[in-house]
Amino acid sequence: MAAKLLEGAPLAEKIQNELRTDIAKFKAAKNRPMKLVAVQAGESSAGTRGYAKSQAKACEDLGITHQVIELPGDIKEKDLLARLRELNSDSGVDGILLFVPLPQQINPRNAQVEISPAKDVEGMHPENMGRLFYGTQTVAPCTAMAAVELLKSSGVSLAGKELVVVGHSEIVGKPIAMLLLQSLNESPTVTVAHIATSKAGLTPFHTKRADIVISAVGFKPNLVTADMLKDGAIVVDVATMQVPELDAAGKPVLDKKGNPKKKWVGDVEFEKAAEKCSYISPVPGGVGPMTVTLLMRNLVRCAMASLGR
């Protein structure tokens, strides 16, 4: 069985096109484009730089102003919180996000709480998380929404399916579970596996009986192997990591300068899993393109709410 690919780019383009009408309405009403501000404290990682670049491109394509505010790595927490409050009160800013990880002297929860729920484009403020729990959210964590939207694009009914989420982070795993459970009659039966499940050796027990597996761990390539999956399962791989590229003999592949090449991979043993599954998302090209697009959708929803729409 060769799996069909759940590709993010075509779905992302469709959603972006749907956003253009509201973006134009906002610009006409405010006489300015929407504005997204990203705050970076300290040095950025390769992943953060890639995310920032993708944001900038998406904003440019949609006619949205994108600004990155770079703050020193030794900034005091109180000074970062004060900067976030300034952005909250700036009527020319419609959405705010905070790149992580933050310097160790800053508590990420304190910083996230400081962002106004009305401008919280990542859906991480406790107020927005509470609305997610009740199913009344305007915005939600982008990567979690991306995974669920990509899953639904398969067209397969989720009602009553056994679905396992691997990973229970606050920004992906837990929100995925909440998003999946919002329909009274169309929800799957959701199991969330996590590090304690793994330590007990029970993760394969759960994944082998799952009709759908969504993996969102991100620190161990090939964490989910093909033998952990049911024949015909649907797999959404949320993780993205860089690893050395190896040749057929297992030796590092070098670039023209003699440096080891790297490639992007996810949690799932892709090639072998793709022979066993009915649908699978690739890495890269699956959840990634959707994450930035749903960040844009969150921004549009925040901005339009400020107009009372």
Image (cartoon, grey):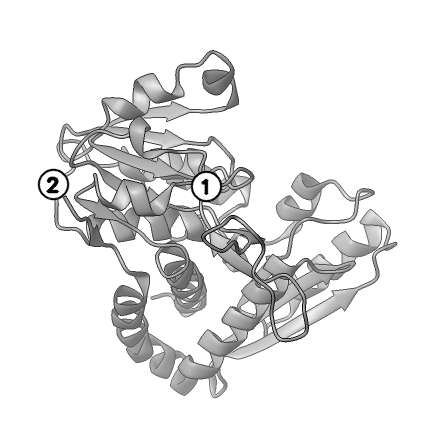
List x then y, in percent, for residue 177.
Answer: 35, 33
Q: For residue 1, which quarter of the picture?
A: top left
Which quarter of the picture shows residue 161? top left
Q: Where does label 1 land, which residue?
A: 172
Q: Would you say residue 134 is visible in this rendering?
A: no
Residue 176 % position (x, y): 37, 39
In this orientation, which residue lies closer to the viewer: 198 or 157? 198
For the residue labelled by badge 2, is the local secondary structure a helix, a strand or a loop?
A: loop
Name the amino acid, label 2. Answer: Ser
- Of all residues shown, which one is farthest toward the top? 200
Instruction: Give 13 or 199, whichever is nearer the viewer.
Output: 199
Residue extending furthest toward the front? 249
Q: Is residue 36 left or right of 17 when viewed as pictured?
A: right
Q: Which residue is mark 2?
A: 157
Image location of residue 121, percent across then percent down: 50, 58
Decide which of tag 1 and tag 2 comes sooner along the chain.
Answer: 2
Asked if residue 79 is positioned above or below residue 218 in the image, the reply reads below
